[in-house]
Amino acid sequence: MSRIIAIANQKGGVGKTTTAINLSSCLAEAGKTVLTIDLDPQGNMTSGLGVDKNELENTVYELILDECSIKESMVDTVVDGLKIIPSNVNLAGAEIELLGINEKEYILKNAVDYIRDNYDYIIIDCPPSLNMLTINAMTTADSVLVPIQCEYYALEGLSQLIHTIDLVQQRLNPNLVIDGVVFTMYDVRTNLSNQVVENVKENLNAKIYNTLIPRNIRLAEAPSHGLPINMYDAKSAGTESYRMLAKEVMERAKG
C-alpha cells in the first residue's frame, strides 16, 4: 500500500520544503520507492533535489492543465529511487486557469491515482498558502504532516490550517487525517523552543513526532548545492534527525 503525505503549513519559513526534500531523500535511502510532487510555484523543492527548474519541458503546471501525462511530468532527481514532478514559476498562474474547470479540487488526485501503486511514498510539498493547489494536495493525500517552527508565533495560523483540513475532510476527502506535527529549527539552548513544544502539545489534538529537527547550518546550506542533507553531509545533526523522522514515518505506516 502506498502512502501519500502532504507537507503543509500556510506560514512561510517553517522548514516545510526542507522537510519535504529531506524526508523524501531519507525514505529513498531506506530503500523505499518515492515520488515527490512540488506544488509550490517557487520550485525550491525541485532545485533542492538537483533539478534545473528553468530547463523543464513538463512540470506539475502542465500536468494540472492536462497538457501532459503524469509519466511525462516526472523527472529523476539526484537521489536514487526518488523521482519528482517538478515546479517552476509558471505554476503561479494555475489558480486563475483552474477557475472554470469542473471538479478542479480533484485534478491532481485523478492524475496520481494512475501511478500511486508504483510507489511506497508520495510526498507533496504544498505552497505557503491555503489555495486551490493546497486543496488539491489534500484531496490527493492520505495524511497531512505539519512542520512547526520553534518560535513565538508558532501557533498563529495553525487553527486556520486545521480548519481547512477539517473542511477538506467533510466535503472532499473523508479519509484525510493529520499525520502529526514535526518541530523544526529547534534550539536546545533556548527555553523558547521548549515552551513552544509544550504549548503545541497542550493546544493540539494531533500526534507529535518525537524527532526534533535542529537549527543546523548544514541543513541551510544543502539546498544551494542541489542536494538533500543526507547526500550533502551524511554525518550532520540534520541528517540524523531526518533519518529518525523517516523511521518514525515508516513505523506509523505499519501501525
Image (cartoon, helix red, strand yellow):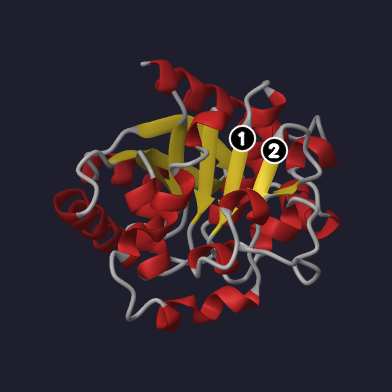
Residue 248 vs residue 215, the one in the foreground: 248
For marks 2 and 1, the one nearer the N-term is 1
- In the displayed structure image, the side of residue 104 where residue 60 appears, left or right: right
How crowded pointer 2 is (Cα within 10 Å; few <14, some 14-19, many 20+) is rated as many
Q: Residue at x 80, y 63 (%)?
A: 52
How crowded pointer 1 is (Cα within 10 Å; few <14, some 14-19, many 20+) is rated as many
Q: Position of residue 243 (x, y in %)?
A: 64, 28
Q: Amino acid at mark 1?
A: Val
For the C terminus, the image quarter is: top left
Q: Position of residue 112 (x, y in %)?
A: 47, 46
Q: Is residue 170 visible?
A: yes
The number of callouts visible is 2
Q: Secondary structure at mark 1?
A: strand
Residue 209 vs residue 132, the one in the foreground: 132
- In the displayed structure image, the side of residue 216 where residue 176 appears, left or right: left
For the N terminus, the image quarter is: top left
Q: Is residue 133 above or below residue 82?
A: below
Please give the residue where the numbered disc 1 appears in the rendered image: 34
Q: Position of residue 179 (x, y in %)?
A: 36, 37
Q: Residue at x 42, y 22 (%)?
A: 253
Q: Mark 2 touching mark 1, by CB under 8 A? A: yes
Marks 2 and 1 sit apart, C-alpha to C-alpha, by 5 Å
Residue 166 vs residue 94, the one in the foreground: 94
Q: Is residue 22 above or below residue 133?
A: above
Please give the residue where the numbered disc 2 appears in the rendered image: 82
Q: Position of residue 228 (x, y in %)?
A: 75, 44
Q: Is residue 191 visible?
A: no
Q: Residue at x 69, y 38 (%)?
A: 82
- In the displayed structure image, the side of residue 71 where residue 151 appears, left or right: left
Question: Which dot marks residue 163?
Answer: none
Q: Amino acid at mark 2?
A: Leu
Q: Secondary structure at mark 2?
A: strand
